[in-house]
Image: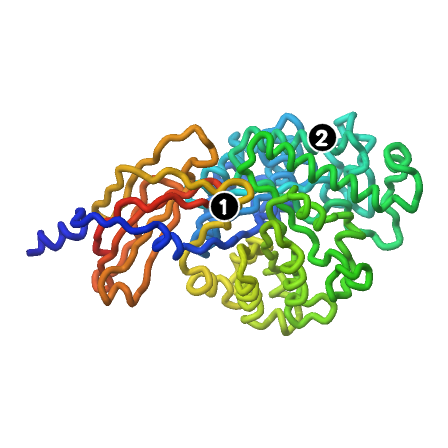
Amino acid sequence: MMQILFSLSIFIITLVFVPKFLVARQIPHEMRGVWVSTVFNIDWPSRAGLDSQAQQAEAIAILDQAKQLGLNTIFLQVRPAGDALYVSNLEPWSRFLSGRAGQPPYPFYDPLQFWIEQAHKRGLELHAWINPFRASAGANHQNSNHSNPGLQKWILQYGNQNIFDPGSPEVRQHLLRVVADLITRYDIDGLHLDDYFYPYPVWGTEFPDTLSFRLFGTGNPATRNDWRRQNINMVIESIHNFVQQHKPWIKFGVSPFGVWRNRSSDPRGSDTRGGIESYDHLFADVLLWEKMGWIDYVIPQLYWHRQDNRANFNVLLEWWHRTIRNRHLYIGHAVYKIYEDDPVWKNPSELPGQIRAVRNLNRPSGSVFFSQRHFNRNDLLGLADTLRSNLYRLPALTPNMPWVDSNPPQPVINLTYGRGEVSWETVQTENPFNEARRFIIHLEPVGRRAKAKGPVWFITGETRFRLPRRPLLSRSRYHLSVMPVDRLSNVGAVNTLYLISY
């Protein structure tokens, strides 16, 4: 009798064909991301000078934590300040790896390649995050790119920063070469630009781009701000065009400052009184980029709480929701503000409430958290537990992007199950769009006891998956299926279902 029961748990006893939508509709599409900042070793590596094994161990711990929290996307800062956390012939190795600019990690390895492989293995997306114009980080840090004669004259000192002048065609061409190099050589899922276009203003000090304005602009002071915005527009458009020509499945997005313009500056603006306005001070015309289809997603940094009188989270959320209609809107949340001396941020329900408000938008959306290191702290007001056991208890795919491609990948083949492990094979294709990149292992409950617990699913980047152990007393019967997912989160057909005990 025991042998029969054991056999029922590991072998096929029925073949069932179920319409794809009955299973796939249960899998949410929601951005759940985290920024991993490398500038000043904010998140990774924990300090400069760690050997390669220690760096890799920290990276794996971050990726495992992201998976446990229910996240699905890593935004890894790979170019924090005119440098590279990857093999590059265009820019020097970042000092945030070895402690010295231009020095590779030891023993040698390619950090970005390592992150990509390990993220994909776990079914996570990896978006390469670059800062476009920061030439150095830190007031007393000599920029290592000064040795580049073509760029040297276009590095401007502003406050305590060295900035590549966006008004210089040479600077913009160099940036495009950096992007082209990244996109061509690495299997990244996305390219991500942060909020630092022109630098944040140093009040009372004009950005020193007089020379480039005289050479490449009109020279008329009345047009200077429009010229600056046009410089950034050209960067965004050129990156978009390159991506579309070479790897159109790569998602291109930005994370602007959360206030585009106040209503007092523009009737189209938000009902806020923010001191900084992205359009006027950082010269980022995000609404134009979205209108023209140059970006795939926008992640405004809404780093205010829901009771703020000057820039209220709910007010800004609704404004961005109304304004960004043709592309995806994700929301950036300020996890670090939990540690501020503000009773609203000390409320354990504030950030979960923000996440729920984003979900209530009833559109492809999601949340991205700044930044990863804060999830390592014990005094996070229960946010990590709330994500892990409630809000993100079951995994989600990133939202798909039908304006790029909506064709699903081919179903998996040779699906087998035995002794708690599922395995399958993929159908080879020459079309990168339809290549299976991730897989959903879906368990549909059978019988009253199992149905009470609801469906269970897992997401992986490998073609073999061991189901997590469950106590014998909690096991029920499920139909098991596997669905492929392509680069743009399009879900392929459900494979033959198996009846298993789990």
Which of the two discs, 2 and 1, labels the residue nearer the N terminus?
Answer: 1
The one of 243 and 332 positioned closer to us in this rendering = 243
**Left or right: residue 433 compared with residue 455:** right
Judge whether residue 369 can be spotted in this image: yes
Residue at image position (78%, 26%) is 150
**What x and y, as percent, mark residue 171?**
76, 32
- Badge 2 density bin: few <14, some 14–19, many ≥20, Cα 10 Å: some
Cα distance between the residues tagged 2 and 1: 32 Å
Residue at image position (80%, 30%) is 152
Residue 174: mark: 2
Res 93 → quadrant = top right
Could you say whether the residue bearing mark 2 is in a helix, strand or loop?
helix
Residue at image position (64%, 64%) is 318
Could you say whether the residue bearing mark 1 is in a helix, strand or loop?
helix
70 w.r.t. 79: above or below = below
**Left or right: residue 124 compared with residue 447:** right
Amino acid type at image mark 2: His
**Left or right: residue 211 compared with residue 16:** right
Residue 461: mark: none
Res 259 → quadrant = bottom right
**Left or right: residue 366 compared with residue 280:** left
Residue 58: mark: 1
- Badge 1 density bin: few <14, some 14–19, many ≥20, Cα 10 Å: some
480 w.r.t. 340: above or below = above
